[in-house]
Amino acid sequence: MNEADFIAALRDLPLHPGARGLQDDCAVLTIGGETLVITHDMMAEGTHFRPDADMADVAWKLVASNISDLAAKGAEPVGVLLGHMLGRDDARFLVGLHEALAAFGAPLLGGDTVAAQGARSFGLTAIGRATHQPVPSRSGARPGDSIYLTGPVGRAMLGFAGDAEHLTAFNRPQPRLAEGQALAPHVSAMMDVSDGLLLDSWRMGQASGVTFALETDAIPVADPSRLADCIRWGDDYELLFTAAPAVRLPVAAYRIGTVIERADAPLTLGDEPLTDPASLGYQHG
Amino acid sequence: MNEADFIAALRDLPLHPGARGLQDDCAVLTIGGETLVITHDMMAEGTHFRPDADMADVAWKLVASNISDLAAKGAEPVGVLLGHMLGRDDARFLVGLHEALAAFGAPLLGGDTVAAQGARSFGLTAIGRATHQPVPSRSGARPGDSIYLTGPVGRAMLGFAGDAEHLTAFNRPQPRLAEGQALAPHVSAMMDVSDGLLLDSWRMGQASGVTFALETDAIPVADPSRLADCIRWGDDYELLFTAAPAVRLPVAAYRIGTVIERADAPLTLGDEPLTDPASLGYQHG
């Protein structure tokens, strides 16, 4: 069973209303008048990090990738639970974990530690508090909205390839917590582009029942000579969002296209409709 | 770094007050006047389940082991997040997951699905709502309290060995949700005995700064001829709790000993002080 089939099957299980049909990056749970935003992301050796990676970077990215999902909902971190598989360089893992928890104001709530054989995997559950309601989703983009991106994509790709200027973008990504909270009251939809700009734009168009018409020349990329790669690679943590054109944004952002009525595909790049998500990016599972 | 060292190091990280110093089985999070109880447990192939296990049983146990931690806090399930590594028999996994979510009233809130190589591991985060405050901990047992167990231990051990009568206890354990909620207002401390009666009694004595004086003959076991094994094996999900002797319990339970002032060890069995937790049970990480 592949990932898409598995997730489709999960949708037939008893779902909490706050699961948003498993269509979003986070669950939204209203408790005692407050709204919590909750996400769980895993990282597996060989799939999400190289076997020789600095485990401090792995820990940082595990936290950052989850906190980025909170950022895209305009939430402020409350705390995290760690699922840790023991192995090499656990002391380094702890260093990176400490740095990330401190940097993002996300103290440890609990978790589990296991000894196991084989490739390692880690899980993190991040819990945040919504600063604005309704909590932004993937599905709120409306025809006429402008499409924005908070910063250039492709930096993590260049860092992965060893480009010194972009190593930090790959190893120590910065979730856009402040930007997400500032933007939440103004956006019609928001998510991070951790799986690549094209794939995540496709998903947001699909979830919203519209077409995202991206303007190639308007997309900020870290290396214009590798534009096609930059907009397909993942591991960037910029925010992709939509807002009515009249909205005055509280943070700087690049306008990269327009939401239109649903056409043949949920995404067009220039004049080209992009129908097949498998060709669009970094579906690492 | 072994599990104990790793967890000790985690205690030096920024901890949420609700983490209870990472000394308990759950985090306790007060939000908007409500109190949530949150836990995250993992299961890894080779450590927690056999490579040829029915994946429906694995999914059930993954949910049950987390829900049991909620039960020990007197919490009612709100929902769960699943961290799933794709692999063989995912359709069976989904069957067991569905059955467990329905049985425990714990709908799916979200999670993550990854493709990875090697031995599989799964994580589950369970979120519950406290039905009584203060939420029972491991650390509240006081000298003079009676020590109780909700049912016999050793059933999972016999089921693991193939005993037909106890297969269900091993493959489809039943968290004591109703008992936990009924008991929460009456207990001074409570936890499940999923790591074995002796080890978990030792931990509760240690956390409470007291000695648990267990009476060997009073402990209900599934097979009296294998008493020593029954009280050391894990995977039973009975509740271990303490209460003042005058308390009239709302559910049937076995009185298995008395809490006394801290002696040489946090646990005595008959007259024997047990100082070394490594000898007591199922520390599978």
Image (cartoon, coloured by chain):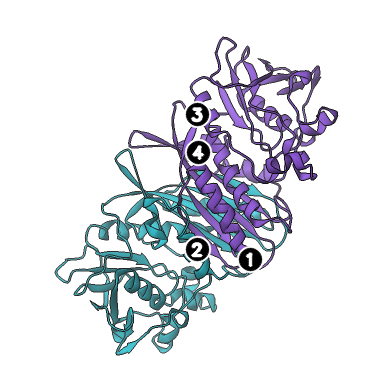
Chain colours: A purple, B cyan
Is A273 drawn above or below residue B36 in the view shown? Answer: above
Give residue A182's position: percent from left, percent from top: 50, 25
Q: Amino acid at mark 1?
A: Gly
Q: Amino acid at mark 4?
A: Ala
Image mark 1: chain:
A
Kindly check if marks 4 and 3 are in contact, taking CB atoms under 8 A apart as contact.
Answer: no
Specify whether disc 4 shares its chain with disc 3: yes
User: Where is mark 2, residue-wise?
Assistant: B9
Kindly check if marks 1 and 2 are in contact, taking CB atoms under 8 A apart as contact.
Answer: no
Relative to residue B222, is residue A48 drawn left or right? right
SS for dot 3? helix
**Mark 4 and mark 1: Cα distance apart in space:** 31 Å
Is A7 drawn above or below residue B239 in the view shown? Answer: above
User: Where is mark 1, residue-wise?
Assistant: A87
Most foreground residue, B97 or A35: A35
**Mark 1 and mark 3: Cα distance apart in space:** 36 Å
